[in-house]
Amino acid sequence: MAYKHIIATFKDETVLLKALTRLQENKVNLVDIYGPFANHDILKKFTRESRLPYMAVLYGLISMVSIFALMYYTSVIDYPISYGGKPIFSFPPMVVIMFLVTILGTTILSVLTFHGRAFLFPGKPTKIIDPSVTDDTFYLVVDQNYNPDEIKVWLEESGADEIMEKELNT
């Protein structure tokens, strides 16, 4: 379904940050920001804190417990081998394996979580507002939730280079 949005272009990210602050103070619905590179100030202002690091810690604990359980099961329960008077379950040699598999499991589960949360999958069509977004221009997409003329005035006062209206599929 296509919705009409106001799109403002900015050449300078500091001007975009000023406009973003102004729009958030006036409770305008911001749809998205497109830009040629990531700016951490804009990301902090536009998005909320990610919970992915907390999930990574949980995935690390799950991976560590799982690999320990697998190694214990295989070396003690399923196939115990007593050779040379050594103990059946020797923990120190397994520390390195547990460490590496914990890192591998955490990485794989974190990447899958990120892709699932961001709805990234092979064959997903891309949304490109304008081809110059990859060159040197930032695009601020704003929902027309109330009085579009007032939103345009705020954007002009903030220093937007160009303001246009487009129908976008969201």
Image (cartoon, rainbow, N blue to C red):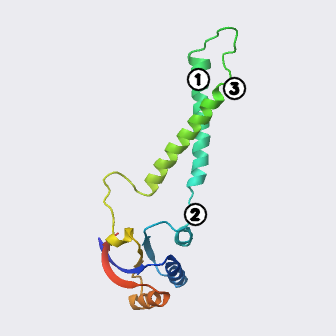
Mark 3 — residue?
92
Q: Give, as a three-letter code, the residue at label 1.
A: Tyr
Is residue 167 positioned above or below 50 on the image?
below
Q: Are marks 2 and 1 in contact (CB under 8 Å)?
A: no
- For marks 3 and 2, give the CA distance: 38 Å
Residue 86 left/right relative to 156 = right
Residue pictured at 40% horizontal, 79% vertical: 9
Which quadrant: the C terminus? bottom left
Q: Earlier in the sequence, mark 1 or mark 3?
A: 1
Residue pictured at 48% horizontal, 48% vertical: 111
Mark 2 — residue?
49
- For marks 2 and 1, give the CA distance: 39 Å
Given residues 140 and 2, the one toward you in this image is 140
Given residues 87 and 96, the one toward you in this image is 96
Residue density around tag 3, few if under 14, some if 14–19, many if 20 or more, within 10 Å: few
> Which disc, if any, is residue 73?
1
Is residue 59 positioned above or below 27 on the image?
above
Q: Is residue 45 visible?
A: yes
